[in-house]
Image (cartoon, rainbow, N blue to C red):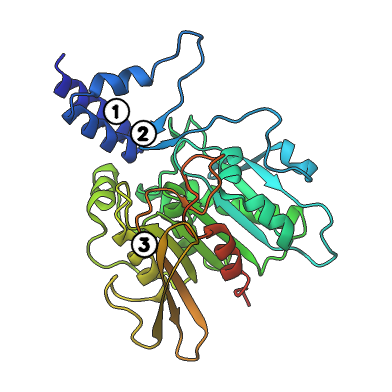
Amino acid sequence: MSNITRTVHEAMRLMKTGDLRAATQAIQLGLRGKAQLLHDASQPTVSGAAAPDVEGEYRVIPDRPGDAPGAGARSWESVHGFKCAAGAMQYKLFIPEGLGDAPPPLIVMLHGCTQSPDDFARGTRMNALAREHGYVVAYPAQSKSRNPRKCWSWFLSENQQRGRGEAAIIAGLTRHVVKAHGLDERRVYIAGLSAGGAMAAVLGSTYPELYAAIGVHSGLPVGAAHDIPSAFAAMKDGPRGSFAASQVPAIVFHGDGDTTVDPGNGAAVIAQSIGAANAGAGVAAGRQTVERGSVSGGREYTRTLFTHPDGSLAAEQWVVHGAPHAWSGGDPAGSYTDPLGPDASGHMLRFFSGFRRS
């Protein structure tokens, strides 16, 4: 079998799993005559342990016993299960010790492809911030049986509708956690990275009565794709056409050096959140404030605040200049993190604190 034929077969296999980043990488490597290298890297090592997946310069870091990111919370060690009519899902839960008597808020965190709750918690440092600010954090886990590379299937029509598919399971899990632990149902938020960011946008759109605000990092707007080919196109070239407005407050982070998910998708998520017809329409009834800054010793960024006519915040967009497909300001102990960027986790918590459902 020729290298180019092997490359095509490998790319098609990865596309069927939903991991479009890996499919793109397979094509790029194959065109450079390295298709066999990609194939070999996916095979077991001599010792029998699976070699770590490599996507660009970011490693997929396996979970390590005794290295859980939930120190100070006994609940973190347990893996919980949830089941509803739409399906079943496992998740991990971080409940900080020393919470006050008032019902605490909840953040649902959706990992990216190949990641796990432990890896995602390490990379985002969200548990440490949750302990500091009094949040409970739930981490749903995509199963390999549903997707071999643990990607959320945000691009399938059945997962973009209320009452069906993965969105219905995550929404049901969210309600269960709120009820079981006496959390504040007015302050429930959802955020995610890449495929998890796209799925967070889906949840905000399909269950606006459940989530007070969303955080989308390196993700895509709802409706950008309906199958694998259209997902590949949206990731590569950006979204096309107009999308239905979700009008759920959103904070969006995206690196303009992202070669996996076109940065135009971040602008489209903002447009969807504020009810604009398309990514270039802006907020006709409100206004925008643009700020530019930089992280000391790190990256420059452009932050745009979108406000309602009464001056209240509607959405917030961060474009991190030069940043790749990775969580901005994340801890290198986790996969897909960019320590040089502004702290996405901290800014998401700040943004969420300004919103609650009536």
Task: Name the residue carrying label 2.
Answer: 17
Measured in 3D between alpha carbons, the distance from the residue under mark 3 to the one under mark 2, in whole angstroms, is: 24 Å
Left or right, residue 167 beside residue 42: right
In this orientation, does residue 77 appear? Answer: yes
- Nearer to us: label 1 or label 3: 3
Q: Which of marks 3 and 2 is nearer the N terminus?
A: 2
Q: Residue at left 57%, top 54%?
A: 171
Residues at marks 1 and 3 touching, judged by CB atoms closer than 8 Å: no
Q: In this view, does 43 lie above or below 132?
A: above
| Quarter of image, res 135 | bottom right
Residue 239 vs residue 331, the one in the foreground: 331
Count of labels in the image: 3
Image disc number at residue 266: 3
Q: Quadrant of the N terminus?
A: top left
**Figure quadrant of residue 91:** top right
Within-10-Å neighbours for mark 1: few <14, some 14–19, many 20+: some
Indicate whether 349 appears above or below 36: below
Instruction: State the CA–CA distance, disc 1 to disc 2.
Output: 7 Å
Residue 33 falls in image quadrant: top left
The three-letter amino acid code for the residue at tag 3 is Gly
Amino acid marked by disc 1: Arg
**Is residue 120 found left or right of 247 in the rendered image?**
right
62 in relation to 161, above or below: above
Q: Which residue is drawn at 77% across and 59% down?
A: 182
Residue drawn at 48 percent across, 66 percent down: 251
Q: Which mark is residue 13?
A: 1
| Residue type marked 2 | Thr
